[in-house]
Structures are given as structure tokens and as C-alpha cells.
Image (spheres, helix red, strand yellow):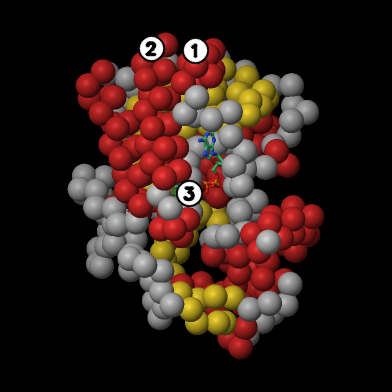
Amino acid sequence: MRLLVTGAAGFIGSAYVRMLLADGVARAAGVSRITVLDKLTYAGSLDNLDLGDPRLTFVRGDICDAPLVDRLVGEAGQVVHFAAESHVDRSIASADAFVRTNVTGTQILLDAALRHGVERFVHVSTDEVYGSVESGSSTERDPLDPNSPYAASKAASDLLALSYHRTHGLDVRVTRCCNNYGPRQFPEKIVPLFLTSLLDGGDVPLYGDGLNRRDWLYVEDHCRTVESVRTAGSPGRVYNIGGSIELSNRELTERLLAVCGANWSRVRHVPDRKGHDRRYSLDDTRARTELGHHPRYDFTSGLAATFAWYRDNRSWWEPLKRRLTA
Ligand code: NAD
């Protein structure tokens, strides 16, 4: 079976494809070939994929390009959809690309999946669709209440994907995961932004009072559970995927400073992000009980692996940071 994976030149999608191609995981799961469709926006890089692997075909293209999507979906048995504009701050500056890629692009993929009768469509969504949760944790039955344009565009695509199951009977499965961290995350997101700035001897910008809270999951743990959803999940079902630790941004910053051997003097307080959600928290009982979701990395081991990767792979991130600051 050929698997179409969208957005897999980016952070999480590329980790998912690397996992599938490693150690025969793909073969074990009935995948003989993988096609990656990625537009290579600023967030995508071919360095994230092993293009020499004969099982992998890379197609540079836009998920909004309906004829291209129709051809690639027609060749695939199943789809795992990661492609998205993913940075909240960019969505606040301009929502245009977010609506286009996250909403229209998903609809174009779903229409093609329906036309070609694909077996399964895994839509990768996010905990941000639930909006800010002051206390307790969101279950899959909670209403969506997104706040940022990014989260609103992800909520729209998430509900659209579910509507294709309810209306047309397409086998759609949706994952809603918490914040990921790990190697190859674009250095505009908090963990790689802070690590690379500290490695360069610079300071780090902490939003507002730093008390916004997030749940953190190492990227490989996310990918393993996305794969469980594809292989063992149920049609029309949503799976929250929670992390190994909940931290305020202050606590996260303290951990990042410590792993880099730096102290609080390197922190620069900056005005808060507009509409900054205070807290996300997922009840992931369903993924744990039905799919065996269980983070293998605690935050200490995951952060050590992430730090080591950024320390040892300057040639990956230095050009990206130069472009960000140019
Ligand atoms: P990313 O920004 O690192 O990668 C996104 C990829 O999508 C890039 O390779 C980019 O080139 C590609 N892309 C963007 N627009 C495209 C288009 N129109 N057509 C084809 N490709 C396009 O993002 P990520 O952090 O790897 O996130 C992947 C998915 O996981 C997203 O759907 C995101 O909403 C979701 N998610 C992310 C997190 C997180 O913490 N990063 C948490 C939960 C869910």
C-alpha cells in the first residue's frame, strides 16, 4: 500500500516518515511506499528526509493544487495529513495563508480522498482547538473554542474532516496533540528558539508574566501514537494525545537555561502575545486505554536529546535563523 503523507518536510511529519522507514516499521504496518507532498514553505526542508530511500517519493507541491492532489491521492491507499501553517504568531500577523492551507487545503484533500475511496484519512489536529482551559482537562467530547487565527483554522479543518466521516462515511480519524518538542523543529518555536539563542550566547524573549501553561510531548512519542491511530484507531474517532509534563513558560525557560548552562540573566521580558491562551490540558484517557499511548521520553531525557541535536547540528539551523533575522 502506498501512503501519502502531507507536510512531511516539516518537524513532525518528517519524524513520522523517518520512524516509518526505520527498522521495517512501514513494512510491518502494510506500507510498501510513501509519497510525501510538501510545498517547502519556510518551515519545510528536504534535509529532514532521506531522499535516497527507494521507498520514498518526494513531490514538491501545494495541498491547494487540486489536480496534483487528485493524482497523488488516487495513487495512495491511505493519507496522513500533517501539512499546515503552524505558527501562532504568524497567524496573528496575517491569517491568509492559514485559512488557505489549513482549511481549503484540507477540504481539497478530503474531496480527493472521497473521490478515490481512500481506506483511511488521519487528520493531525491540535489541543489548541479547545481554547484556553483554566482548570481540568479537555476531553474529546468538549466543544471547540479556539482563540488564535491558527487555532481557528485548525478547528475548522478538524471539524471539516469529521464532517466527511459523518456525511459521507469516509474513514477519517483525528488526533489532537499537545505541544511537541524535539530535533528539527523550526527555530521560531519556543524550545528551538531558546536553545539556539542560548547556544549562540544570546538572550531569550519571555512573553508576559510567563505563567501560560502547556503540556509537552517529545515528537517521537507523538508520531508513534499517530501511527497507532492509523493502524488501530476507529473511523470517525478523535484521539487526544497528551504529553509527559505540564509546565508554565517560566518553568520551561528555567529548564532550557539549565540544560544550556545559563541563568535567568539571559531572559528578556517582552509584551505578551495578543490573545495568549493561558493553559491547554488534555484528558487522553482514550488514547492511553484504546491505543496504549504512553510517552517513552520523560521531559528530562527528551530535552537532553533535543539539546544535543541542536548543539551538534548547527549547519541545519544557522541558515534558518539567518533568514529569520534578515
Ligand atoms: P511545521 O510548520 O514544522 O511543518 C509544516 C509542513 O507543512 C512544512 O514542511 C511546510 O512546508 C508544509 N506545508 C505548509 N503549507 C503547505 C501547503 N499549502 N501544501 C503542502 N505543504 C505545506 O509544522 P509541525 O510542527 O511539523 O506540525 C505538523 C502538524 O501537526 C500541523 O498540522 C500542526 O497543526 C500539528 N500539530 C503541531 C504541534 C506542535 O507542537 N508543533 C502540536 C499539535 C499538532
Residue at mark 1:
74
Position of residue 79 in the picture relative to residue 61 (left or right): left
Under circle 3, the secondary element is loop
Residue type pointed to by label 1: Gly
Q: Residue 115, which numbered label?
A: 2
Residue at mark 3:
86
Q: Earlier in the sequence, mark 1 or mark 2?
A: 1
How busy is the neighbourhood of tag 1: few (under 14 within 10 Å), some, or many (20 plus)? some
At 44% from the left and 58% from the top, the residue drawn is 93
Question: Where is residue 42 shown, x and y percent of the image?
Answer: 61, 47
- Whole-Å distance between the Cαs marked 1 and 2? 8 Å
64 and 8: which is toward the camera? 64
Check the image and report above or below for 320 versus 304. above
Q: Tags 1 and 2 in contact by the CB under 8 Å rule?
A: yes
Under circle 2, the secondary element is helix
Q: Is residue 208 visible?
A: yes
Question: Where is residue 212 shown, x and y percent of the image?
Answer: 38, 71
At 38% from the left and 32% from the top, the residue drawn is 104
How busy is the neighbourhood of tag 3: few (under 14 within 10 Å), some, or many (20 plus)? some
At 23% from the left and 25% from the top, the residue drawn is 166
Question: Where is residue 314 shown, x and y percent of the image?
Answer: 77, 59
Residue type pointed to by label 3: Ser
Quadrant assignment, res 148: bottom left
